[in-house]
Amino acid sequence: MSTAIINISSLVTNDPSLGEGPLGLVQDAAVVVDGDRVAWIGASSKAPATDNAVDAGGRAVVPGFVDSHSHLVFAGDRTAEFNARMSGRGYTAGGIRTTVAATRAATDEQLEANLLRYLDEALRQGTTTLETKSGYGLTTADEARALRIAAAHTDEVTYLGAHVVAPEFADDPAGYVELVTGEMLDACAPHARWVDVFCERGAFDGDQARAVLTAGTARGLVPRVHANQLGHGPGVQLAVELGAASADHCTHLSDADVDALASGTTVATLLPGAEFSTRAQWPDARRLLDAGVTVALSTDCNPGSSFTSSMPFCIALAVRDMGMTPDEALWSATAGGAAALRRDDIGRLTPGARADLALLDAPSHVHLAYRPGVPLVSAVWRGGAVVH
Ligand code: NIG
Ligand code: FE
């Protein structure tokens, strides 16, 4: 069945061959969806005949957001920790253990219901693809069940057994790395596409991170890295050296880190919700873009450092505080996320791409940053079906 969405004031395609500038902007546009794919893009007045038509009413359409970094298989709540931070306490990786205890104590049904709640919340804000991770189980059984639950609801699943050293191994971090690269990896690899490690003081150092990523690669997983969030460190350069799909956070970067990202294929994924919720310095998106680095924007949604599922909120922060233009932020939240997940079927609206799109209650995508905090996503299609 084919549907034409007509009378779109401003359409972001992310295909420069279809329209103006890097966003491939088309004014007074129509999109024809056939089955789960985009079939045609062009002027509204020239839209071909279809089974159905939807009138966008002179509003904007953007590709569905691609949130390439979240941590949604968890239980419990860290309101007290957030409150303490907002009264002046700093953020440390140690809070992760609070969520580990709550997650281990939860049933499969509770974890799945929690995941579904946040997936739905994200969808209603325009997110049509969402990556999510393990990392709050830290035993073989708990990590494997987190990935099993995640894999039932998204294709983009990441093994993060190396989030922090499990409490049982507090005195034996080497033993924990052995577990993560051995028995736990064996149980988890069948459920995941990606392997990740929190390479940071208080979590895993460069040598440990390398061991985790190379073991994952040997099992067919593709690396991505939590890098340079809380301070300078080896994470970014390790990510580039190992050909990771993405280095995530990138808050504290040396010139050599920026040069490495500019010379490699690793996407820099910036997570402004984390800096917002930990009152930390903003990642410098301008510096990365000016160096020619591919930048993605994601939520990092998790109960500790960034409890937002809203890509529009992240776009607004990136524009206001990280030196991005509204066009750059929109690209990074869609095509950038797709690049970080090595996908070319999403993040753009071009014939043959998956029909994932969001209709905004606004005349253009610029309003996502111009009207922060306003729920502008009024309808969402995923795989050609109206899902919100
Ligand atoms: O991406 N950095 C490590 N992991 C998460 C935080 C998880 C937590 O605090 O529970 C992050 O910010
Ligand atoms: Fe994270």
Image (cartoon, grey):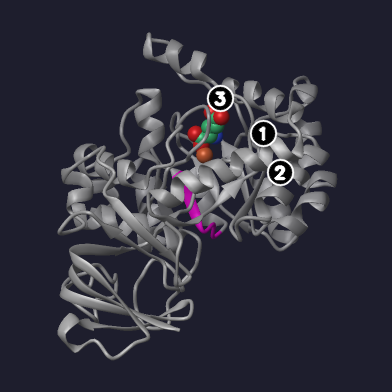
Q: Nearer the viewer, residue 350 or 51?
A: 51
Write down the residue under mark 2: 146
Instruction: Identify the element where label 3 is drawn.
Output: helix
Q: Position of residue 168 (x, y in %)?
A: 80, 23
Vertical comparison of 18 with 371: above or below: below
Write down the residue under mark 3: 93
Q: Position of residue 88 (x, y in %)?
A: 38, 10
Density class for disc 1 (Cα within 10 Å; few <14, some 14-19, many ≥20) is many
The C terminus: image quadrant: bottom left
Q: Residue at x 73, y 30 (%)?
A: 106
Instruction: Tell me which corner region of the image, top left, top right, bottom left or bottom right, holds residue 117.
Output: top right
Q: In 3D space, how far apart are the residues under numbered discs 2 and 3 (Cα atoms)?
A: 20 Å
Q: Residue at x 16, y 45 (%)?
A: 370
Vertical comparison of 22 with 131: above or below: below
Density class for disc 2 (Cα within 10 Å; few <14, some 14-19, many ≥20) is many
- In the rendered structure, are the residues bearing label 2 and label 1 in contact, judged by CB atoms less than 8 Å apart? yes
* Magenta residue span: 243-248
Q: Nearer the viewer, residue 116 or 225?
A: 116
Instruction: Identify the element where label 1 is drawn.
Output: loop
Q: Residue at x 48, y 76 (%)?
A: 36
The N terminus: image quadrant: bottom left
Q: Nearer the viewer, residue 369 or 165?
A: 369
- The reply, left or right, for residue 154 in relation to residue 19 is right
Residue 312 visible, this orientation: yes
Write down the residue under mark 1: 136
Q: Amino acid at mark 1?
A: Tyr
Q: Earlier in the sequence, mark 2 or mark 1?
A: 1
Q: Earlier in the sequence, mark 1 or mark 3?
A: 3
